Image: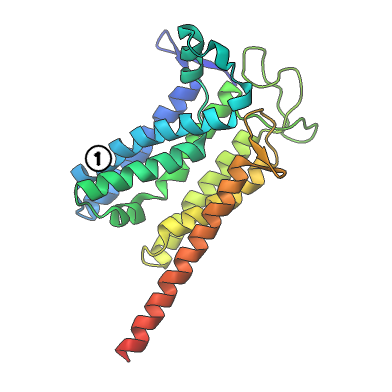
Amino acid sequence: MHVYLELFGHKVASYGFFIALGGIIVNLIAVYILSKRKMDINDFTIIESIGLLGAFIGAKLLYLVVSFKDIDWSRITNLSYLTQIMQGGFVFYGGFIGGIIAALIASKANKIDFRSYADEVIFLIPLAHAFGRVGCFMAGCCFGKPYDGPFSVIFPDNSFAIHGVKLFPVQLFEACGLVIVSFALLFLKKLLSRQFQIELYFILYGILRMITETFRYDAARGIFFDLSTSQWISILMITIGLASIWIQLKKSKGNECLAD
């Protein structure tokens, strides 16, 4: 695990490197799939670019919310302190929610069928997320609880994690889970003829995040009634996913009855 990597003589932040690597790989896969399906790449680019902007804003806003008590607001006008806060600290769920909202707005404004694109490539989101979690592991952020068992890790002094203590490698645990979610969505995509892809992602990732949150030990958790902010959002995502599937199945059954 190294906060920085040496690439061609240059010092590169490992977290950013793995996010960029994941982004490149999933975009290449997305372009291949959409081209094969003869779908408009320009429309996808609009959805993705606006979605990424919303994701950045949402991830930072939720970080500020869950870290509200840890931020020295009396120094917020200090440019160096403000820069430090803005450069670090992002929450995935905030990014996901912000990205979805921005992508939906962009789709509506440009008369693009958001659902058709999401059903094709949403399985790539957990794959890209897995690369991000590997980056978290390399940098030491989002670290796990003290743990003295198999696969425990000790982070170096320059990482963001507690160093000198054996910790559970929750970042890699979640990365493996995300890869499994990605392949599960890909399998179900073929099995269910591209139905319920968004809902299934909500459900599967919500369950995974509920589990991994119990192994997290970093401060930015935001605890309410013994559950973290991310666990509450996970419960909401699972509920929305199940409710949406139920509503669609009920409508489909009703249409079949009318046809009979």
Quadrant into which the N terminus falls: top right
Secondary element under disc 1, as helix, strand or loop, is helix
Can you name the residue that lies furthest to the front here? 74
146 horizontally vs 183: left or right: right
| Residue drawn where x is 60% and y is 34% of the image | 171
Quadrant of the rendered image containing residue 115: bottom left
Splitting the image into 4 quarters, where does residue 55 fall? Answer: top left
* Foreground of the two, 192 or 202: 202
Q: Say which quadrant the C terminus sits in.
A: bottom left
Mark 1 surroundings within 10 Å by alpha-carbon count, few (fewer than 14), some (14 through 19), many (20 or more) = few
Indicate left or right for 50 with 58 as reference. Answer: left
Residue 1 vertical position relative to residue 25 in the rendered view, above or below: above
Judge whether residue 22 can be spotted in this image: no
Residue picked out by circle 1: 45
Between 18 and 225, which is closer to the camera in this rendering?
Answer: 225
Q: x, y (%) of residue 153?
A: 70, 27
Horizontal side of 108 relative to 138 (left or right) equals left
What is the count of numbered marks?
A: 1
Q: Is residue 211 left or right of residue 94?
A: right
Q: Nearer the viewer, residue 211 or 27?
A: 211
Is residue 257 visible in the rendered image? The answer is yes
Across and down, in percent, residue 233 comes to 56, 47
- Callout 1 amino acid: Thr
**Eyeballing the image, is 137 above or below 191?**
above
Q: Residue at x 55, y 28 (%)?
A: 136
Give the residue displayed 19% in from the left and 47% down from the top. 110
The coloring applied to the image is: rainbow
Residue visible at 54% across and 50% down in the picture: 205
Residue 163 x %, y %? 71, 18
**Where in the figure is residue 27, as x and y percent of width and height?**
32, 39
Placement of 12 over or under 53, stated as above or below: above
Judged from this view, the residue extending furthest toward the bottom is 260
